[in-house]
Amino acid sequence: MNALIECVPNFSEGRRKEVVEQIVDVAHRTAGVQLLDYSSDEDHNRTVVTMAGSPDGVEAAAFEMIRLASELIDLNQHHGEHPRLGATDVVPFIPLRNATMADCVTLAQRLGERVGRELGIPVYLYEKAASRPDRVNLADIRRGEYEGLKERIAHDESKVPDYGPREIGAAGATVIGARPFLIAYNVYLKNATVAEAKKVAKAVRHSGGGLAYVKGMGIEVEGMPQVSMNLTDFTKTPIHRVQELIRSEAARYGATIHFAELIGMIPQQALVDVARWYLQLDRMEESQILENRLNDLAAE
Amino acid sequence: MNALIECVPNFSEGRRKEVVEQIVDVAHRTAGVQLLDYSSDEDHNRTVVTMAGSPDGVEAAAFEMIRLASELIDLNQHHGEHPRLGATDVVPFIPLRNATMADCVTLAQRLGERVGRELGIPVYLYEKAASRPDRVNLADIRRGEYEGLKERIAHDESKVPDYGPREIGAAGATVIGARPFLIAYNVYLKNATVAEAKKVAKAVRHSGGGLAYVKGMGIEVEGMPQVSMNLTDFTKTPIHRVQELIRSEAARYGATIHFAELIGMIPQQALVDVARWYLQLDRMEESQILENRLNDLAAE
């Protein structure tokens, strides 16, 4: 099966529709790339584009979008609620199918080098592509935003970009990296209070001593107690482990799982992993899934 | 998403490779059709072809295969262990994606009419496409085989074909129909005897008063007790229901599920249904599966 990679670039423009459309249009006219979604937020003055395709395809589309954004967006004129460093603010690559995290790191480095050299934009690598521990978290890199970086980039050693010049223009700087697919997964509890949902969330999430790749909090939604989560790496912490730990922690309070919900998209693999675990299909191979065979054949 | 239908024609030739290859080659050269698998059995003197594609594609490929087989295979010269009526013995259509059973019944009728009219081959409709209750089961239609049908077709009212002439040539007759996807699913038990696996199988299968779309028996495989099953309609009796009933029946004997296995292919939908049930994802939509979006977009 062909390698498939997701790319979710964020642009500092959420108000001028014609600018957003020009950028989004790149995905339509780049071979091997499919636009999955895009959404603009006027208050944040920001647009998030979701596309998927071949490694070469998403790299080419991302470069062209960054180039276009650098011509169309002036950070000196940009105001919005969301923190940002550049016209193209952040570009993560996510392995979807037949691609590893290492492939996405390589892609981030290659794109970063080219953006620095050809467009003269400072580039910082983040998450799995980070070159230093203090650049793993996006929030750390973005602290001070465009205006702060403009003052400090030339003389502050902590701000030396991974690629591109130590000077910043109207396009700002761009953060490029690689990360796993993020699943937004919520579990509603029955016979529980919101306070109990908060305790369950704390027990399940990484920061509370719970599962490694789970962020979460207890909240009330539509009058029901909910454990609201981000699963940051389903290949390491699979959804069934989250589900069964929530079940066990909730039972402590005499509560049960009412139902669960997914917000946004989920890779097929995450659901197949769940089915395989509950059915104990230890010997199952991916090629036994009929649709995978069809994709294989179509890709030949 | 485009309609996707599986077609699994069975041919009465499993020894002459050049004949099999000519028939299989039809799938390669028919637009909109993909060959998934084919296997020949010399003792049965029979070949099973598995292909998938658009409704028009699989219909065209099936017709051309039936035409070719009628030229290349002479039932008067055919000997094999497997019961058979014709050069093309049986042609089931199976809905895979964005297609209903009714679509497959229509397809079976359309193909049957054309085979009867253009090729002069008697056609019997079976399973969901059957025109009479005594033609639902393939074994009932095939009783007496080619040789018996040859004697009776002209005067026995129970043998009047659904399409085509009341006379039979060297290509014999063909049974065409529609049926759900069949999943071969086996569950190995721990701390159980083979006798107990037989009891569990009897409790779970339809004929023993168990689940509607389960056939099964208890056997020993690699020294382990196994509940060996055919799930004949996973949309009506989903795999998780089978799994949990086996778990409960096995517990009666102090046994547990060791592991399970799939033989051959499974539609993605069957595994998604399992994940959805165990995770209680009541609100999930198919379009939330990322790969489905990609297929949609590719099909646009």
Image (cartoon, coloured by chain):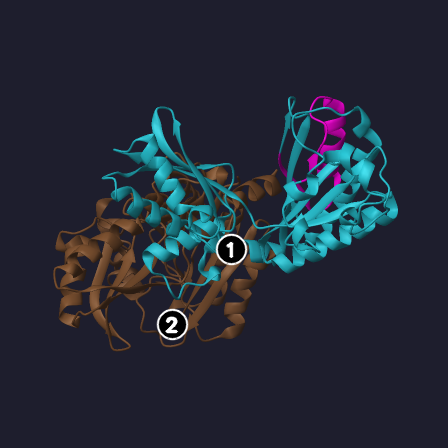
Chain colours: A brown, B cyan
Image: B64 above or below A48: above
Q: Position of residue A9 (x, y in %)?
A: 43, 58
Q: Which residue is mark 1?
A: B292
**Mark 2 residue element:** loop
**Magenta region, residue range:** B9-37
Kind of residue at badge 2: His
Image: A14 above or below B162: below
Answer with left or right where residue B126 lies relative to residue A166: right
At horizontal 71% and vertical 56% (from top left) the residue drawn is B131
Q: Which residue is mark 2?
A: A78
Kind of residue at badge 1: Asn
Q: Nearer the viewer, residue A62 or B224?
A: B224
Q: Nearer the viewer, residue B223 or B295?
A: B223
Residue density around tag 2, few if under 14, some if 14–19, many if 20 or more, within 10 Å: some
Q: Is residue B31 magenta?
A: yes
Q: Is residue A105 magenta?
A: no
Image: B282 above or below B240: below
Answer with left or right where residue A32 lies relative to residue B148: left
